[in-house]
Amino acid sequence: MNSRNLLVAYSVLGLALAGTASPAMAGDALTLKLDYVADVAGVVRGGTTHKARVLDNLKLSADLDLESAMGWSGATLHVSALNNSGATPNDDAGTLQGVNNIEVSQQRARLFEAFVEQSFAGGRGSALVGLYDVNSEFYANESAGLLIAPAFGIGSELAATGPNGPSIFPSTALSARLRWTTESGGYVQGAVINARAGVPGDPGGPDFSFDDGMLAIGEAGWSGAGKVAVGGWAYSKRQDDWRDVTTAGDPVQRRAYGAYVLAERRIKGGEDEPGRVTAFARAGISDGVTSPFRGGWQAGVLIEQPVASRPASQASFGINQAYLSHRERANARDAGMNPGHTETALEATYADSFGPVTLQPDLQYVIRPSGNRDARDAIVATLRVKIGF
């Protein structure tokens, strides 16, 4: 079965899960959505190759209100599937953090999320079980969502962990999440997730053995006219050291853990005022021995409706910096590189919608790709086209 047919099969599977409702009830309770993103990206200075690379991401999602469909009070079902194809522009840029948030190492169709969420206590609490994108609720700043660099999605010191990466794009893992909110906007949430990410469509599919243990993550904060939060994460089983090995040649096993803080706040303009500006900032640290990063930070601004006559226009500017672990720098020296302590990138982007189509030119300037002092700074230009229904 080719990837397009496999994607259709997953979409049908999602709808079949919702099919316990009668057709009339499901028509009112079921919401379907299609989002397609295509990027033309290329390194125009520095890097290793100056070529235009094309990559894309197709996402189909279905949300079913189980209370309307079958009388299950307070419950919803969410299913989504992805198909990713195209090139890998970061190979040309040579960065550690990446330059494009839809780039994948394996181009294929996947079931992305499939979970049931149950609310309780008048909507203050909710519980979720299933395949779940941790970054949809943890370590996330909504005002950073327009930026394309992956570091603005989730901190690199967490994104680079786990035997197959944590439960984030493009492959999630079996998860259980609890969340409680207060009337004043305070919240606390926690999740336990299979340490090995994998979904139908990935080689080997989802993991049910839990042989690699669990990832536990928690976050507490306040959201309202802004957001402030602090979080922490840890793996239940020791992970491979990034450099040290035993006498038998196997990686030494180490504890993997980290913490982060984040904040965002509107600093200019009212709710619907053109030119309103929201600023965000966050920082994270990790154990520094089980991944190439010991920490990092990101900051930036989102400007909504910068062109007063264009209600859908948006602009965003951001900076991210990753701190390389001592082990990553030692590995780089072994490979003949001249490593520094950081990899830094600046990004500027603008987006505007024309009916269902959004055009977004983007420019990134990467200082010392991979932290290599001898590497030329890289400039990456991208044109993103988004279509949503």
Image (cartoon, rainbow, N blue to C red):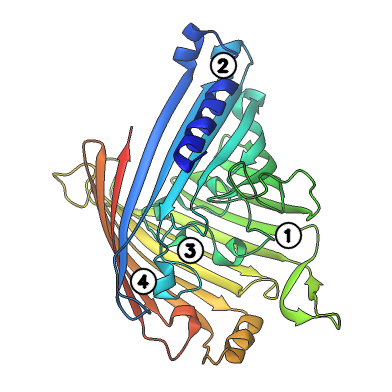
Query: Is the residue marked by circle 3 packed among few (<14), some (14-19), or many (20+) residues within 10 Å?
Result: many
Task: Tell us which disc is closer to us: 2 or 4.
Answer: 2
Left or right of 161 in this view: 33:
left
The residue carrying mark 3 is 151
Dot 1 or dot 3, earlier in sequence: 3
Q: Residue at x 57, y 21 (%)?
A: 16
Q: Report the amino acid beneath label 2.
A: Gly
Q: Which residue is mark 2?
A: 19
**In terms of secondary structure, where does tag 3 sit?**
helix
- The Cα–Cα distance between marks 1 and 2, rounded to whole angstroms, is 38 Å
Asked whether the viewer can see residue 202, the reply is yes
Q: Is residue 152 above or below residue 94?
A: above
Q: Residue at x 45, y 49 (%)?
A: 84
**Residue 292, image x, y percentages:** 61, 74
Q: Is residue 24 above or below residue 103?
A: above
The secondary structure type at the circle numbered 4 is strand
CA–CA distance in space, label 4 to label 3: 11 Å
Q: Closer to the observer: label 2 or label 3?
A: 2
Does the CB distance between marks 4 and 1 fall below 8 Å? no
Say which amino acid is labelled 4: Leu
Q: Which residue is identified by label 1?
A: 234
Based on the displayed image, in which of its 4 quarters is residue 191 positioned? top right
Give, as a three-letter code, the residue at label 1.
Ala
On the image, the x and y values in percent for residue 198 come to 64, 48
Q: Residue 93's x, y, as percent?
A: 40, 74
Q: Which residue is mark 4?
A: 346
What kind of element bears circle 2? loop
